[in-house]
Image: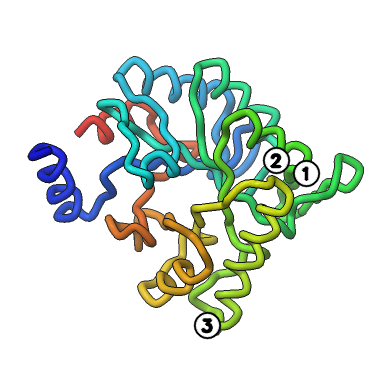
Amino acid sequence: MRWAALLLVLCACSGRPQVPILTHHSISPTGDEFTVSPEKFAAELDALARSGFRTVSFHDWLDGKPLPPRPVILTFDDGYEDAWSAAMPALRARGMTATFFVVPAWIGADAGHRVVRAEGGLTFRHLVWPEVAAMSAAGMEIGSHGEHHLRLPDLPDDKVREEALESRLEIEAHLRRPVEVFAYPYSSSRARLRAALRDAGYRAAVSGSVHGGADRFELFRKGVYANTEVEGVVRELAR
């Protein structure tokens, strides 16, 4: 118990959450700087496993359940189709889990209504609800990334609450299970937004490396990108 209390104090002082959190976006052979190749993603998972890290969910952490000695939470933003076709198979092959933050406005009803967006010269294909439901049933945690992926600090308070609450309720209606965690779009968070997310029924929220810290509603995440050195990430987590 003394060690657990000391760990909480050290995390609070360092501005990092008790459990380290990694951020991913797309897992694909081609894409922008936010896209990690399947080969590199597999190498990352294997490096984490070799170093003794074990994936856990936000739910288990927030519930205070016993965690392995080196817990880590893997997250994926934006709800791309390759979360289903590439990320989840790699995770399941290694007995790992992750949390996927989806944008309901970008989730189609079925494969015939898949949302495909063009942005910055690239094409982005998003998940459909049957895929999200299957991921949830397979043990993956599903969180909200806002109803329309808007930059919340730019919105009035009533619109922030709408983005947070409507997205949670819509995901829960499709999955028939609670949605407990929110990811700030663009990792753009502010202290004034924490109360709005708490009032919208979330138990925690994740940000990024700029605004994130140890606060449960503005948690720090380490980003993994196309040019990220896998072994460097693992060394940083180990420290």
Q: Quadrant of the C terminus?
A: top left
Q: Position of residue 83 (x, y in %)?
A: 64, 35
Residue receiving disc 1 = 128
Q: Position of residue 123 (x, y in %)?
A: 75, 47
Can residue 95 be seen at all in this image of the molecule?
A: yes
Q: Amino acid at mark 2?
A: Val
Task: Look at the numbered discs 2 and 3 and tell me whether their residues touch, using CB distance below 8 Å.
Answer: no
Looking at this view, is 84 or 95 the one in front? 95
- Residue shown at the point (27%, 55%) measured from the top left: 214
Q: Quadrant of the N terminus?
A: top left
- Residue shown at the point (56%, 16%) measured from the top left: 93
Estimate the spatial distance between the alpha carbons at disc 2 and disc 1, rounded to whole Å.
Answer: 6 Å
- Picture quadrant of residue 45: top left
Classify residue 64 as left or right of residue 85: left
Estimate the spatial distance between the alpha carbons at disc 2 and disc 3, rounded to whole Å.
Answer: 29 Å
Residue receiving disc 2 = 132
Figure check: 99 above or below 50: below
| Residue 157 badge | 3
- Picture quadrant of residue 67: top left
